[in-house]
Image: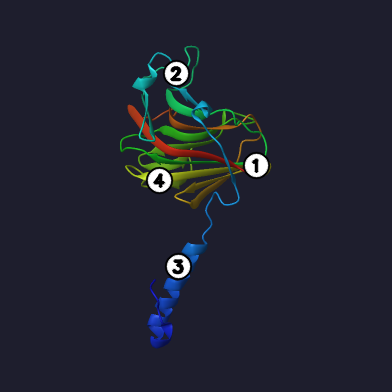
Amino acid sequence: MLFIDCRKMNSFYKFFCLFLLILKYHHLCAADPTDGFTPVPLTEDNFVLQKPYNEPLDDRYSYKDGVRSFWIYNHDKPFKADSTTRPRSELRISGHDYSSGIWQFEGYTYVPSGTSGVTIVQIHGAAEGATSLQLRMYDGDIKYYKYNVVATDLYDKWFRVNIIHNVDKGKIIVFIDAVKKFVVKDQGPGDLYFKCGVYAAPENSSNFMESRWKEIKLYKK
């Protein structure tokens, strides 16, 4: 362990020493988004996969060495023949739909450069509309739908995503790499659940879209 004796330093170095100690204290005391939450057990039975209805699952999804890869093309069909929705290859957390309480999604994701105009994680369900939250990738930046920028420069790297949904207070908080990045009011109560993968945005989607996910977890209070 590094020991710094500030008493033997001049005023400048004492200030610098104090700054380092504050940083260290902040690092040690910084709360994790999952503090105070209880893990919800998940098995493969809780992971329902959706993909273009006319494509074999292996052509739009893979699971190897703990990493789930999802990919689609902009011209792909929807997940059902009678659906008018955009193409998707997604994992829906099933068996833990919620309508009250405080719930949290966690996962590590990797989005390769070139993927753009695509939702990589969402909360499905709302009083009005289909979703309470969509986090979309546009040119390396994560946005709330197509509006607010949540985080930037995220291509070609693994990053951690935590989403806390306090239904009773109508509030959603987004963390990237354990740093609070975005707070927004939700879209009202509904039958709510989390999804991740790739779901083409209504417009300006790249021809090929991919995201990779690992260590997907669910928590609640």
Return the residue at label 4. Answer: 159
Return the residue at label 3. Answer: 24
Task: Describe the element under mark 1 as helix, strand or loop.
Answer: loop
Q: Hey, what amino acid is under mark 4?
A: Phe
Q: Where residue 209 appears, x then y in whole percent?
A: 35, 30
How far apart are the two marked residues, 2 and 3, measured between alpha carbons? 50 Å
108 w.r.t. 64: above or below: below
Disc 1 + disc 4, Cβ < 8 Å: no
Q: Hey, what amino acid is under mark 3?
A: Lys
Q: Earlier in the sequence, mark 2 or mark 3?
A: 3
Q: Earlier in the sequence, mark 1 or mark 4?
A: 4
How far apart are the two marked residues, 1 and 2, measured between alpha carbons? 30 Å
Assign the C terminus to one quadrant of the image: top right
Q: Hey, what amino acid is under mark 2?
A: Pro
How far apart are the two marked residues, 1 and 4, measured between alpha carbons? 26 Å
Number of labels in the image equals 4
Is residue 151 among the parts visible in the rendering? Answer: yes
Q: Nearer the viewer, mark 2 or mark 4?
A: 4
Few, some or many C-alpha atoms within 10 Å of disc 2 (few <14, some 14-19, many ≥20)?
A: many
Disc 4 + disc 3, Cβ < 8 Å: no
Return the residue at label 2. Answer: 78
Is residue 146 among the parts visible in the rendering? Answer: no
How far apart are the two marked residues, 2 and 4, measured between alpha carbons? 28 Å
How far apart are the two marked residues, 3 and 1, measured between alpha carbons? 34 Å
Q: Earlier in the sequence, mark 3 or mark 1?
A: 3
Return the residue at label 1. Answer: 170
Task: Describe the element under mark 2 as helix, strand or loop.
Answer: loop
